[in-house]
Amino acid sequence: MPFNQDPSQTDKPTILVVDDEAGPRDALKVILRPFFNVQSADCARDALRLLQEHRIDLITLDQKLPDRQGLDLLQDIKQLYRDIEVIIITGYGSLKSAMDGIRHGAAGYLLKPFNVTELITLINQTLDKKKRLDFLRAFLAGSQALWQSEDQAAQAWVRLRENYQALTKHKTERRIESGDYADLVPLLSSLLEAKDRNLLNHSSRVSFYATLLGNRLSLTPAEQKSLALGSFLHDLGMIGMEAAQTSEQTTAQAERLGRHTEIGARMVLSLGIPAEVGQIISYHHERYDGKGFPHGLQGEGIPLLARIVGIAEEFDRITSDGPSATPLPIDDAIRYVVQQAHTHFDPRLATMFAQVVSECKTSLPALALANVPISAPDP
């Protein structure tokens, strides 16, 4: 596709301002032009045309457009141009619209009238994040070593962490060791997002649900930390999976997808993360009746933390938007968990999970969406 851009301006990021009102649109252009290349559109149709004609780094998007809703356009943009960041700027905001925007991939949300300093700060932070994600996407596309042998993976992680630290200007005077993972959560979170924003959101919600249940159990502090990190990383192996090109998977694709637990566990093993985290990743698809995968473990033969994450993962799957299913209402999902006791789930944990989710179900979506683990377990 053509990119009509003045060569003298290629060192500046390009921002597309999408707003149907001339006043706010022109004001944004005046504010942004000293720092960025700026394109503008007053409707969704023109915005999509400009995306075809120019290399856009970031979009400021109004919620109300004459030909479409801003959230509908956001979904199209993230489907067609997933590497472009979007900030919603609107005078019609609400908590629900903000949550919907973030859920569909918006990097930020500002209400009109906005503070200029706040706007520039948010844009710069978002562009810095885009630079990190672009680096990680290129790394994932060009490196298979992260999910190869343990030695190869360990070496690849060291290179990745050093390059990532340099990119984020996070300097350290000490040598990076494979067992030193205090800096890993931001990197791993960015890796999940670089692969797929939906994967990051799913991981964050599963960690929230798992921690919610774990707080009702007599877990040690080390177990609590392993649960928080392991539930967040339960699908880490998915970064080694190729995206399905069609809605129907081939047998080979399904078999490879089933290996994501093995790949993810191998990856964290190469980082020196505690074995309990690797067990969560390995066994969260096992079932209480022994009909799960990859090993067909049964009952209490499945590690406790993996049993917890298995419930949390399935609950999020059935309550979230997906390509082939309509999400269940919270009450129906709670009943499903209880019905699956003794077969899919540990009956004691299923009953406890149903109770704890019922107690906070009115605030559940906002709490789950906001959750991101911020610390790693102690060695």
Image: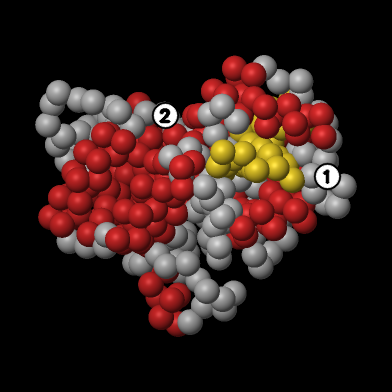
Badge 1 or badge 2: first in the primary sequence: 1
The percent position of residue 4, horizontal first and vertical second, equals: 56, 55
Identified by mark 1, the residue type is: Leu
Question: Crowding near pointer 2: few (<14 within 10 Å), some, many (20+)?
Answer: few
Q: Is residue 316 left or right of residue 287?
A: right
Residue assigned mark 2: 374
Q: Quadrant of residue 38?
A: top right
Q: What residue is shown at x 25% (from left), y 45% (from top)? A: 160
In the picture of the structure, the residue carrying the numbered disc 1 is 65
Classed neighbour count for the residue bearing mark 1: other residues with Cα under 10 Å, few (<14), some (14–19), many (≥20):
some
Farthest residue toward the right?
A: 66
Quadrant location of the C terminus in the rendered image? top left
Relative to 144, is 365 above or below? above
Could you tell me which secondary element the residue under label 2 belongs to? Answer: loop
The x, y position of residue 153, in whole percent, is 20, 54
How far apart are the two marked residues, 1 and 2, measured between alpha carbons? Answer: 37 Å
Q: Secondary structure at mark 1?
A: loop
Position above or below: 105 against 172? below
Residue 201, horizontal then vertical, whole percent: 55, 45
